[in-house]
Image (cartoon, rainbow, N blue to C red):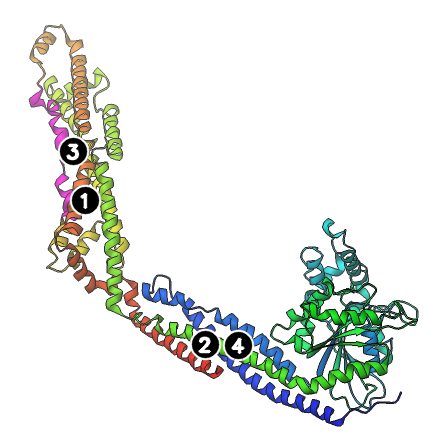
Amino acid sequence: MKTTQIDIRRTERINTIIQQRQRFASRIERDKANLEACKLALVNLKQYQSEFPENSVDATSTKRLREIDFGVINQINNLLNTLEKLRSRCSRSTINIAVVGYARQGKSRLLQSLTGLSNQVIPDGAQGYCTGTLSKIVHQPRLEKAVAKVHFYSASEFQNQVLAPYYKTLGLGEKPITVEEFARTPPPALPLEKKDSEFDKARYGHLRKDYYSNIAKYRHLLNSPTVEIAESEIPQYVTQDAKNENGDKIFNYLAVKDCVISCSFPYEDIGRISLLDLPGLGDTNLIEAERLIKILSEEADFILFVRRPEAHAVWGEAHLKLYQIARNALPNFPVSKCSFMILNRTKHGVEGGDNGYRCQKLQAELKETPIRVAKCIIADCSDSQEAFTEVLEPILDYLVENVESIETEYRQECEQQLNILHQNISIELDKASLALTRYGDGDLLFEQLFEQFWHKLTNDLEKLLAELKENRNCLDSEFEGRIKNAIQRCRTDVGIPTTTEEISERRHLFGSYDMAYNEFLHEIRTNFLENFLSLDRAMQLSLESRKYLVIKILQSYLGELVNSEEIDFLQMIYNLLPDNSNNLKIGFQKLYEFDVSNAGRIIRLIRLNIDKLKPDNNQFALQERINQIEKGTGEFHLEEQILNTLQKLHQEATDTSEQALNQILCEPSTDAYFMVEEFVDRAIRAKNAKLEWRIFLRKESFKVWSEFRQIEQRLQQQKTWIALVERAKEVNGLLT
């Protein structure tokens, strides 16, 4: 066909616009680099903030650190994404026009008319063929035959961009982890709630019958490098129903990410433009919305919405949805200024007949809808001449007149976002500058830590004293148990002869019953006392257990000062206290020495109750019994009487001792309360007690609190923090 000449000035103007855009791309690269530097500085600052040990920062600094909103990093990421799309747009050597529409609306016919490509390359569905993948058609003047570059999915892209949308949209659960897993495991059955949807069933059928059942026929192309092919080979990669020489269906298109077709358009001097052939919305081979959004956001400069008005046509929900998809894809792009609506007019003799009236009706009603486009054009998309004069030529004229201002508006929007982001970052960095102002201040740190110490110490000691007071008249269960054990030993280990023969033998040994009796008393008494020797220590241990309660409290705050868990801890603290710490020194001394006064207390009490076990205090009337023995009467009963007497005396001593000891079962609890009360009075209640602690701990602060050992480290941290803030401010200044 004869080509139509277009004003050469238009071509030159388009080329000039492209060159201007490419120059602007360098500015965007600079902004991106500055943003990346700013992001890195903020990430470093955030990371350094997270490394501050918990509870090592004073309350003021903690509050200020928490007030820094590092959410600006996410704002940077969002803007970087926007700028990358703008850079990609400005860096392209062509102006890309995306042709968008539902299936069977005429967009493929329009592309055929504009590019001169056949139905084999751009299937329009008339022969059952449908576009299977994204095609980018680039105008390359004086190219005799079309050629194409085919780009294939990687395995991961196939999983995430193809399989994942199917599994998500159809409610099939988690997508397969690998392509191999997908090949081994058929997709789960379609959920019941999806089975009533013909559309969902069609999609599921495409996933199951095409992608899964035929994976062996296209799987080998995943991860393949780009291939260059001739025009005759293009259908094998872009159409859904292509067949080989044996008549077998080819499924290569399932592995194709996109196809870039270069050809000479029928019209000369139209400039460097490209047409994007998107699979029709409503086709079941793709999850259209997600795919369309991605393509438009990354590739499109201008959008042609194509619709063929059918009988009783209205602007319904489906067409509003299509427009909204485009708006969502380009949130910062003026879609209303960079899109046309093409109403595809059909004539008599074709499917649907003459729809001229319906086209005019929809054209008039468009302004009543939320759809906003630069122009609404009626044209026969199947007529090459009309497609050029009514569609392409108006588009090119519009681009020449408006694309620069549109791009400027888009760039200004990005620059405005950049300025807002700069201001937001400045606010947060100002907060960061003040965050650690007092972080290395030792005086402030001491006052904060001392007040925390004093509050906790007084609270813990008063709480302990209250518990001891509540129990001061209660039996000491551990001490009671030890007394019972001692008494039980007395009753079982009596030290008394078990037979009269032993007494007789002892009389022969000593030469008299009197001396044998006295010797037995000495043995029983000493054996009796041995059972109670441990009770003095038991009472001391009971008191010491209460001391350990105090020591435990003190150690929780002073453990770094003295490395001891024994009673000696008290003596060690006493030695460290300044001489002018009168109350504290007395308190620690008395607490340390309190057990001394109890030494031998139990034994003294027991001895008072076993006086009858002394020979001088319990003489046995032996002489009368001896006279009887000499006369031959009573000898047999003397030993028995001695045994009975010894048993009786031992029993009396045991009973009286038990009674006496039961009277002092509460004394360990009582003594413990008064012991601790004396310490509490001296340590926290006495006049100047808090001051004495303050003076003492000020001197020992580096030993008591690890925070003070970190003062130098804190100063270095503060210095590093300030340096990071200043670096962030420096790179943030580059954003303006």
Residue 81 vertical placement versus 209 (above, below): below
Residue hosting label 2: 423
Residue hosting label 1: 676
Q: Which residues are magenta?
A: 590-618
Q: Residues within 10 Å of mark 1 (few under 14, many from 20)?
A: many
Residue at screen point 8% across, 18% down: 619
Q: Is residue 189 visible?
A: no
Residue hosting label 4: 417
CA distance for labels 4 and 1? 68 Å
Using residue 279 as the reference point, say whether residue 51 is left or right of it.
left
Percent x, y of residue 593: 14, 46
CA distance for labels 4 and 2? 10 Å
What main secondary structure does the magenta stretch of the protein show?
A: helix
Work out whether residue 410 or residue 568 is closer to the camera in this orientation and state it: 410
Quarter placement of the N terminus: bottom right
Q: Residues within 10 Å of mark 3 (few under 14, many from 20)?
A: many
